[in-house]
Image (tube, coloured by chain):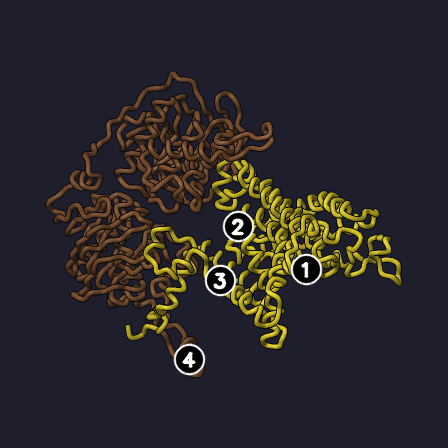
Chain colours: A yellow, B brown
Amino acid sequence: MKKEPKDNNWSPSKLNDEMNSVLSTPEASPLQMAQMSPLRRLVASFGLPRLIITAFLLLMFIAAPFTGSDFWTQVSNTINRFSWNAVLVLAMVPMIHSGCGLNFGLPLGIISGLLGATMAIEFGFTGPVSFFMAIVISTPIAIVLGMGYGWLLNKIKGGEMMIATYVGFSSVSFMCMMWLLLPYKSPTMVWGYAGKGLRTTISLEGFYDKVLANFLQINIGTLSIPTGTILFFALLAFLMWAFLHTKTGTAMTALGSNPAFAKAAGINIDKTRMLSVVISTWLAAVGILVYQQGFGFIQLYMAPFYMALPAVSAILIGGASVNKASIANVVIGTFLFQGMVTMTPTVMNSIIQMDMSEVIRVIVSQGMILYALTRKTKGGNN
Amino acid sequence: MRNVKKDFYGNQVLSDINLTLQAGEVLGLCGENGAGKSTLMKILFGMDVIRETGGYSGDILFNGEKVNFASPFEALEAGIGMVHQEFSLIPGFTATENILLNREPQRRSVLSEVFGSRLNTLNYKEMQRRSAEAIEKLGVHIDADMVINDMPVGHKQFTEIARELSKDQLKLLILDEPTAVLTEKEAEALLDSIRNMSRRGIAVIFITHRLHEILSVCDRVVVMRDGRVVRDVPSGETNVMDITRWMVGRDVDAAAQNEARDLSNEPTILSIRNLWVDMPGEIVRNVNLDVKKGEILGIGGLAGQGKLGIPNGIMGLYEAGGTVIFDGKEIPLNNPRHCLEANLAFVSEDRRGVGLLLDESLEWNVAFPAMQIQGKCLKKLLGGLIKWRDEKAITDLTNKYIKELAIKCTSSKQKAKELSGGNQQKVCLAKAFALEPKFLFVSEPTRGIDVGAKALVLEALKRFNRENGVTVVMISSELEELRSICDRIAIVSGGKIAGILPATEPSEKFGELMVSGVR
């Protein structure tokens, strides 16, 4: 007893305990929750990080008018950015369901989309048709790349997320070379002097700039809602929801929940996983096209590199875990994350006279991923 | 303990428990699975799960003082030790290191003088002395320098107990089903060491399903049922029959009637030739076996001889080779789907790992294979192009089996992980029954579940066999259980079938077969 080191007597403080129990039981049962205080009940049902971010966002909206920025413009911006990004976040869902984890390899799908976009322009399509053709062209590319990516992930079950990250990295680097080397000729896209090699940013004016956003757009004063883009997202989200209610979708969810169970029930694990990866890759391809039509530009080279982490953290903020995600998680997460990204530059900057938005965005997105990954290990130990 | 109450997710699992225990007394605690034994011990030990699920009510007095342990550390400090059902040992460390983990005697060195006590070196000599002392207290022989990985199961269990014994302040030791994994000889040694401890003034709470052990070692027996203490009697005044009756709350025939039938004239439905299965720890080398239509065939044998490998190999969960002919057609191995499509079903011995989707509802668990393999509970939309999940059909199917198998749950939407072991096993059976198979493999269906649930599970299997004419092959380590429902019993030894006897043969004959091929 005398010789015992201090560590053995260590016991977590009360506060730590409370935090731990809140963090480790996000899905408290109704009866359990009835016994908690109202605050703890809210925290337990909503999740602590999500609560903090929601509160932060609300605070921003309240503070916005006092900093001289127009409230409705801010709301419009938030909705706009939501509409650009929602499909990319939706692309996370199938792989989470099949147990492949978070799709850090999103850039691979984005590259399929970029190839589709640049080829549609190269082949001379303009206006809304170019958007449609970009999707058509990127689809087979996404399917082929997705199958290769899925094959790779099937080889390394258990380490998907790490490998996915490297697939994302290396595909972006590889394409950095290809954008220069591929024989693109269209004068709207290539470097002016050399006459070859694609520019880093390509304007979509005259092609599919705002094709979805302008469809049925609602304008009331300074508030503007890109109805078309939101409808397009709703359609894809509905299809995803419906897919998860089919036989194959059910198999995918069960596979993510317990692979051994799925195997014993005769599910072809590799095929189902590959299907999820292909769907995810295709959604990423469509997602980047939707993003471009809202943003108005195609961004090449290192741009796809920066798209995966915001999408991953958005769905995590929405309440998804490494192996459970719903459409609601996508909608809530994208809104919260993009709301923060939109609001911080205008509101925070005018308050503290410094550009803090990027810092906050990075802290939140990386922090959220870290939080989700620690939660995963907790589950794995049980 | 006074008026201890506890509920989980609205299920009252403990109500008004009153218990007293003297120093040096050995208390046997028994009850069916889900009776609340483990929960009670977790409360006493201050486990996190209790506080996370809303705490408990009532008082616990220890040495005359009211205690409420916020964590196991505090319970340890007060002198309560606990050995869990599952091992908590570090596989790559030796017994000594495990026994004294985090309480190692230390030596100061120059480095630690400078950088603090974290850099103290371990005093291995002292460690060896203390672990030897603990093992000595236990009264068994285990090699203190052996790495846990290399130890037989029984020695691991002893190491755990020795770890608790090495704590000087130990006053109360809780043993949660310590003999479940032990052979009879090892169990006997353990019982001896419990007597030893009691002589040294350490109180012991001993939880087990093996009732004769309780009678032989305990001073007092406490029987729990449905979260209540139903009996608290000195062990001298009772017997196995009484305890069983109290546990299940009804009469249980000690020796279940054996209704073994002679079905040797029936056609062979499943024929296995030269089967090998590469299942770690249960390697099957060369099995030849014919199963008759409509019978219940038992497969028994000692642990590690390969009896579990047979169903796991045929159903495609582990790599296998050989020929399996079912109903005249050869079944391709290494592909679960082909077996399931041929109307074979399998209830795995690994309930939580393979058998269940712990995080999903009972509905998903029961209906999933039937949906995936046979297209049940699916609505066809757009001319069969889309196969839509039919939630209502799933609920109906699940409710049917919840009723038929008397599964205790709040609703068919409850998650599988919230059920007790016996009820989880019933869900696994329901899953297999929902496939309406012609042939059913059941592997260790009663492992880790209590007497009452055991009887229900066996009864359900028997009924399923008799009423639907389903051929059942049941794999079990418990010979008596096999003898109670099977027609014939095959004994596996050394990865081969050592022999097949009618279930009516006396136990000794099976025993001879079991040891015949052991290497």
The numbered mark at residue A49 is 3
Per the model, the C-alpha gap separating discs 1 and 3 is: 25 Å
For disc 4, the marked residue is B116
- Where residue B370 sits in the image (x, y, percent)? 47, 32
Q: Where is the N terminus of chain B found, in terms of image quarters?
A: bottom left
- Chain letter behind tag 1: A
Comes first in the chain, label 2 or label 3: 3
The numbered mark at residue A305 is 1
State the residue in front, A336 or B493: A336
The numbered mark at residue B438 is none
Same subunit, tags 1 and 3: yes
- Where residue B267 sits in the image (x, y, percent)? 42, 18
Residue plotted at (63% across, 58% down): A223
Q: Which circle, 4 or 2, is nearer the viewer?
A: 2
Per the model, the C-alpha gap separating discs 1 and 4 is: 45 Å
Which residue type carries mark 4?
Answer: Gly
Q: Is residue A335 above or below residue B216?
A: below
Per the model, the C-alpha gap separating discs 4 and 2 is: 51 Å
Same subunit, tags 2 and 1: yes
